Image: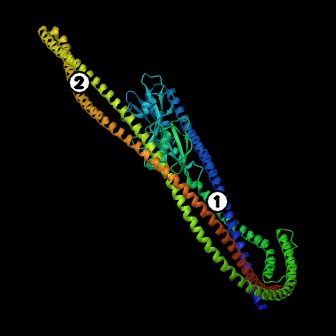
């Protein structure tokens, strides 16, 4: 027995440990997703903030870089233009002596690497002066781009870029030469874009960024990392999405920094020129650091999640550990051991739980002790009950036999009285049924009298209604006759209208003939006559239609008059029949009243018979009721005797069961250790 208890205790402890593991697992299931989601959200927020910050820094760096490039280009152009202006003043100081122009130009040749062909001078007469070693050749002086641009300014200034005879893209610094002669001369120097290309391609501070230069006069690309694009025209329809987007912004004069085709793009106008410098860097390059940072953040977040899970698991185990002792105590209690001592030293909820469990153990000890004592008392009392129930059973059995004999005698007496009462009741019922049928016949006769009276009154009403219908029919015939007379008058009027229309038509025909005789003077009158003729014809047609309709109405009126006369004859015939029916109803009413008097006399005789039968039945029923009461009392006494006998037996049985229950209760209590 003890081994079974130990096995049961071990199984209970094992199940409780499994439940504790499930609680830990549930806590982890609830806590870990929250931690993971929180860390991921924080990582995403950090990555998003870093991404926006990197975009802002890249834009600021790109704008600073492009501004520096534009300043370098402006400084280079200004430096060259100062040199060109100095040379121009030197030539102008010599005067109009054309023989000295070539030597002066030779003196400046080779001193500026940005203008490898040196200076040149063109005149409106088509002459070209250049350095002796210069390879420049211009067949159409006055039609050249640089000459046309130079005619528009006094001081040396840069013009738009163009392609020279050697196929190079150059810009010319030109201006009118004021040497005091009557011949207009233009002095210029071609500047190659090699230096600008170097500034554009190497001046970007950001790694991975590029730039190109655009002339807004004709949207020609002056400098680009891709030499194949230099000299081409920037277009919104370009196959390169970046170039197309840049062209759209430049043409639309929207030079703010923006993102175009996955590139961060900045624009800057070069001061003193019509050029726009465009710098761009792929957003992937900008976000490369952010991507690396995001990966690092996710790695840190993963490590943080693992550490937090370990810490949470440690905390959960520390918190749940004190519950192990309590679960062990509960397991012992389940096995019936109430000798345990519960640890309630903790000052938290677990301590309160232990304290309450200790109180429960003490309460169970006291309860089991009292149950054991009461079980012993119950065993003794059950033995006394068994002895008393045996004595009661013997006495009740003897009383039950005596009551059975008395019951048989009373039963025979009740049967005889009931037969008499049944016969008297049958007689009273027959009389009552006869009286009820008589009452129903009387009620039916009265209802028949009322119905016949109502039928007579209804027939009189029908007769009056037929008279009213006859009068209304006569009035209808008179109204229809009046309508017929009115239709005849309308027919006469329509006939007159037709005659007038015919005469009007003849008059319009005569007027048309007279108008035709009058020639041109009668054309207007002829038109009027024609219209009058059409109107007259229309009136004649309408009159004929109206006449036809009136004839139809007249035929319908005659038909209605005939039907109304037939209805009047039918109404008269029905009126005579209704009068005959009224007389017949009068005769029926008189006969029914006589029958009603006879039925009333019969009802009085039936009432007398019913009274006698009712008295006899009442007396018989009273005797039968008395006999039944005696029989019922006897049966109750017999039943009570049997019940006493059965109760005595039940008491005896219950005493035995009570004794067994006491023994069982004692065995249950003995299982507990207190």
Judged from the image, the secondary structure of the residue bearing numbered disc 2 is: helix
Relative vertical location of residue 37 with respect to residue 582 in this rendering, above or below: below
- Residue 528, x across and y down, in percent: 20, 13
* Residue in the foreground of this view, choosing between 390 and 223: 390
Q: CA distance from mark 2 to mark 1?
A: 103 Å
* Residue in the foreground of this view, choosing between 91 and 45: 45
Q: Is residue 519 visible?
A: yes
Q: Quadrant of the N terminus?
A: bottom right
* Residue in the foreground of this view, choosing between 159 and 181: 159
Q: Quadrant of residue 382?
A: bottom right
Where does label 2 land, which residue? 546
Total residue callouts: 2
Q: Is residue 353 left or right of residue 246?
A: right
Q: Quadrant of the C terminus?
A: bottom right
- Residue 153, x across and y down, in percent: 48, 28
- Residue 307, x across and y down, in percent: 72, 68
- Residue 178, x across and y down, in percent: 48, 25
Relative vertical location of residue 309 with respect to residue 392 in this rendering, above or below: above
Residue at horizontal 46%, vertical 27%?
152
Relative vertical location of residue 606 with respect to residue 660 in this rendering, above or below: above
* Residue in the foreground of this view, choosing between 194 and 131: 194
Where does label 1 land, which residue? 293
Residue neighbourhood size for the residue with mark 2, other residues' Cα within 10 Å, grouped as few (<14), some (14–19), many (≥20)? some
Scheme of colours in the image: rainbow
Among the two numbered marks 2 and 1 on one chain, the one whose residue lies closer to the N terminus: 1
């Amino acid at each position: 027995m003890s081994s079974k208890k130990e096995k049961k205790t071990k199984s209970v402890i094992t199940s409780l440990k499994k439940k504790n593991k499930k609680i830990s697992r549930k806590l982890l299931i609830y806590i870990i997703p929250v931690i993971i989601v929180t860390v991921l959200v924080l990582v995403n927020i950090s990555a998003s903030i870093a991404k926006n910050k990197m975009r802002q820094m890249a834009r600021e760096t790109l704008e600073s870089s492009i501004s520096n490039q534009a300043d370098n280009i402006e400084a280079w152009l200004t430096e060259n233009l100062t040199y060109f202006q100095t040379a121009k003043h030197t030539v102008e100081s010599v005067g109009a002596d054309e023989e000295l122009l070539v030597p002066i130009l030779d003196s400046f040749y080779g001193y500026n690497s940005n203008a490898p062909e040196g200076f040149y001078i063109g005149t409106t007469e088509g002459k070209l002066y250049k350095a002796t070693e210069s390879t420049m050749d211009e067949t159409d002086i006055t039609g050249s781009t640089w000459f046309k641009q130079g005619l528009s300014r006094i001081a040396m200034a840069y013009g738009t870029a163009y392609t020279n005879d050697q196929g190079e893209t150059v810009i010319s610094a030109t201006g009118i030469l004021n040497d005091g002669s009557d011949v207009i001369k233009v002095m210029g120097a071609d500047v190659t874009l090699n230096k600008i290309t170097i500034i554009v391609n190497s001046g970007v501070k950001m790694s991975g960024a590029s730039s190109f230069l655009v002339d807004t006069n004709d949207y020609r690309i002056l400098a680009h990392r891709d030499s194949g694009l230099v000299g081409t025209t920037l277009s919104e329809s370009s196959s390169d999405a970046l170039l197309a987007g840049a062209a759209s912004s430049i043409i639309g004069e929207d030079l703010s920094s923006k993102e175009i085709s996955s590139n961060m793009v900045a624009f800057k106008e070069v001061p003193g020129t019509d050029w726009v410098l465009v710098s761009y860097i792929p957003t992937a390059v900008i976000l490369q650091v952010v991507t690396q940072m995001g990966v690092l953040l996710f790695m840190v977040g993963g490590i943080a999640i693992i550490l937090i899970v370990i810490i949470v698991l440690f905390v959960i185990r520390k918190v749940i550990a004190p519950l192990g002792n309590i679960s062990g105590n509960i397991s012992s209690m389940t096995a019936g051991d109430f000798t345990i001592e519960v640890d309630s030293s903790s000052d938290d909820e677990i301590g309160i739980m232990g304290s309450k469990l200790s109180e429960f153990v003490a309460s169970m000890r006291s309860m089991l002790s009292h149950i054991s004592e009461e079980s012993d008392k119950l065993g003794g009392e059950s033995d006394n009950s068994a002895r008393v129930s045996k004595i009661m059973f013997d006495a009740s059995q003897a009383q039950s036999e005596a009551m059975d004999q008395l019951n048989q005698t009373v039963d025979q007496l009740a049967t005889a009285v009931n037969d008499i009462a049944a016969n008297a009741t049958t007689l009273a019922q027959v009389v009552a049924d006869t009286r009820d049928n008589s009452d129903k016949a009387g009620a039916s006769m009265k209802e028949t009298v009322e119905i016949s009276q109502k039928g007579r009154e209804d027939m009189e009403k029908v007769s009056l209604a037929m008279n009213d219908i006859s009068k209304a029919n006569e009035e209808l015939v008179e109204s229809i006759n009046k309508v017929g007379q009115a239709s005849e008058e309308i027919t006469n009027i329509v006939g007159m209208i037709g005659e007038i229309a015919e005469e009007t038509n003849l008059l319009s025909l005569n007027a048309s003939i007279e108008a035709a005789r009058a020639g041109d003077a009668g054309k207007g009158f002829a038109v009027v006559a024609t219209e009058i003729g059409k109107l007259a014809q229309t009136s004649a047609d309408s009159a004929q239609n109206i006449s036809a309709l009136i004839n139809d109405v007249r035929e319908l009126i005659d038909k209605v008059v005939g039907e109304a006369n037939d209805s009047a004859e039918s109404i008269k015939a029905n009126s005579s029949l209704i009068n005959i029916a009224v007389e017949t109803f009068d005769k029926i009413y008189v006969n029914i009243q006589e029958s009603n008097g006879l039925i009333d006399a019969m009802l009085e005789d039936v009432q007398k018979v019913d009274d006698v039968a009712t008295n006899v039945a009442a007396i018989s029923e009273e005797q039968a009721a008395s006999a039944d009461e005696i029989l019922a009392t006897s049966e109750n006494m017999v039943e009570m005797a049997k019940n006493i006998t059965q109760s005595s037996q039940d008491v005896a049985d219950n005493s035995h069961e009570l004794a067994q229950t006491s023994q069982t209760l004692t065995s249950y209590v003995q299982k507990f250790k207190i």
